[in-house]
Amino acid sequence: MNVLAVQFDIAWENRAANFDTVRRLLDAAGVRPGSLVVLPEFFASGFSMDVERIAEDAGGETEAFLATCARDYRSHVLGGLALRSPEGSGKGRNELAVFGPEGALVTRYRKNYTFRYTGESDFFENGTEITLFDWNGFRVCPVICYDLRFPELFRRGAREGANLFPVIANWPVAREHHWTTLLRARAIENLACVVGVNRCGSDPKYTYSGRSQIIDHLGTILADADEGAGTITAALDPATTQAWRDEFPALLDLR
């Protein structure tokens, strides 16, 4: 399966500008039908805590954009967005949505671990469940940013057969080494492919170094976006991943 990661400098709280940037990058990349396209966390707004300004209802403008991209490129498209809580708590939900080639919603996932260090927990409700979907031989379990620091979340996915983990993020340059190290660790320990998609550029509070990466089941970095805007791509083979799991059956020893 072809995986394509989109890294760019997210325009602050400006959906239209970010939609235009994503379209331009995808058109330039020449997305192959049947791909998995992965966009960053909060790709339409940046990591804003202004819930009233950036949050949408389910099925809103950002999800409509993702659905259109999935149809146009005949691929699965995954991206992060802020949703309003249907419980009326005044908080938002940091989620991702996945749309398939027909433009239909495949699944949603809500970030399990909101980032207390930045105050995200004060503005966004955390989730408790994981989600998985199947595409081109892979069992895909997507997660969001700070979730990367909690290996037990990935183990939950691995126990349910996940062999590909997209990790979408707004991960600052100050902790870049943690980002690149933990992406490889999650791949190695779960005998799974990992697609880490970060933003680059800056927002009113932080600077981001990008370093989106596509990593195979051995922890080998197949593609690295470095610091600039653009796309990276790699071909992943579920049969090769399964062959390694058969040869080195560490997951059978989980307790």
Image (cartoon, rainbow, N blue to C red):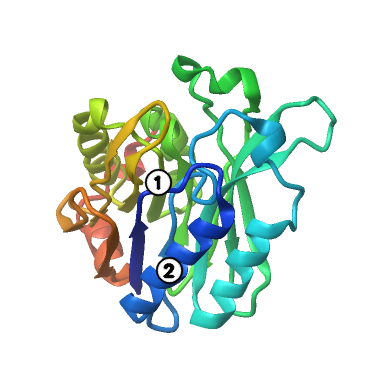
Nearest the eye: 163 or 48: 48
Q: Which three-letter amino acid code belongs to the residue tagged 1?
A: Val
Q: Which three-letter amino acid code belongs to the residue tagged 2?
A: Leu
Residue 112: percent from left, percent from top: 56, 32
Which residue is drawn at the image coordinates 37% and 35% (left, top)?
254
How dense is the environment of label 1, judged by Cα within 10 Å: few (below 14), some, or many (20 and up)?
A: many
Which image quadrant is residue 128 in? top right
Which residue is drawn at the image coordinates 63% and 57% (left, top)?
62
Residue 135: percent from left, percent from top: 48, 70
Which image quadrant is residue 55 in? top right
Which residue is drawn at the image coordinates 34% and 61% (left, top)?
5
Q: Is residue 39 left or right of residue 233?
A: right
Which residue is drawn at the image coordinates 42% and 39% (left, top)?
154
Q: Height in image: 89 above or below 188?
A: above
Label placed on residue 192: none
Which element type, helix, strand or loop, lies under badge 1?
strand
Q: Is residue 243 left or right of residue 163?
A: left
Q: How many marks?
A: 2
Q: Is residue 8 left or right of residue 176?
A: right
Calculate the distance from the C-alpha at mark 2 to the C-alpha at mark 1.
13 Å
Residue 29: percent from left, percent from top: 32, 76
Q: Is residue 240 left or right of residue 130?
A: left
Residue marked by disc 1:
167
Reading the chain from its start, which is encountered first: label 2 or label 1?
2
Tell me whether the residue at label 2 lies in contact with that at label 1, contact meaning CB atoms closer than 8 angstroms: no
Residue 208: percent from left, percent from top: 30, 37
For the C terminus, the quadrant is top left
For the N terminus, the quadrant is bottom left
Residue marked by disc 2:
36
